[in-house]
Image: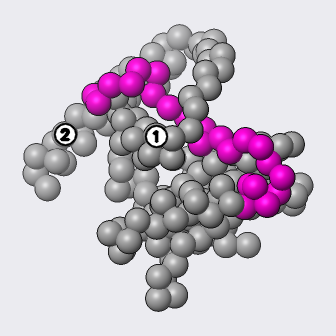
Amino acid sequence: TDFPMIAKMYQETAQRDGFAIRPLAYYLDAWQSFYDAGMAHSLIAEYAGEPLAAVVLVKFGSTTIYMYGASTDKERNRMPAYLLQWEAIRWAKSQKCTVYDFWGAPDNFVETDRMWGVWRFKDGFKGQVVHHIGAWDYPVRPFLYNLYTNAIPRYLNMLRRRKNLVG
């Protein structure tokens, strides 16, 4: 499989777009486990033999879920992510799936939401938003939970703002 290359590309995506990810071993283990169970499929967009973007899909029953997407900074004007989504939908149909789940949308559809750009991309495919019951946290250690959910994100946002002002 191409999972190691996709994981590195995912790491590049996270660094470029400013979101935190788990250690790469986490993704490699998860993707390989789904693949070994016959549930995962990956697609890679290339130009002139150079990988530009990738997706990892998980098929469960009649649903294909777009679990992870990654891209490089190379040839972004070629819009490889759109091609990949189209090919992913075609693959899902070939697997007799009736649902292609883009997995995730903002809670509030406003331009200030940090997921707005991702949402605009997904909305371009003119699907249907389906709301499911959300997930809730049960903080076993309230102090550490507060650090994780409040203090650390604020600190990281401050660092990002400082980097944007300098860089």
Q: Nearer the viewer, residue 78 or 152?
A: 78
Q: Position of residue 156 (x, y in %)?
A: 31, 36
Q: Position of residue 60 (x, y in %)?
A: 82, 44
Q: The N terminus is located in which quarter? A: bottom right
Residue in view at x 56 percent, y 38 percent: 127
The residue singled out by tag 2 in the image is 161
Tell me, yes or no, if residue 33 can be seen here: no
Main SS class of the magenta portion in the image: loop
Question: In the image, which is nearer the foreground, mark 2 or mark 1?
Answer: 1
Name the amino acid type tagged 1. Asp
Q: Nearer the viewer, residue 95 or 21?
A: 95
In the visual, does 125 lie left or right of 74?
Answer: right
105 to 90, vertically: above or below: above
| Crowding at mark 2 (Cα within 10 Å: few <14, some 14-19, many 20+) | few
Residue in view at x 65 percent, y 59 percent: 88
Residue interval drawn in magenta: 91-112
Name the amino acid type tagged 2. Arg
- What secondary structure is found at the residue carrying circle 1? helix
Residue in view at x 45 percent, y 28 percent: 106
Tell me, yes or no, if residue 57 can be seen here: yes
> Any magenta on residue 103?
yes
Q: Position of residue 112 (x, y in %)?
A: 28, 28
- What secondary structure is found at the residue carrying circle 2? helix
The residue singled out by tag 1 in the image is 123
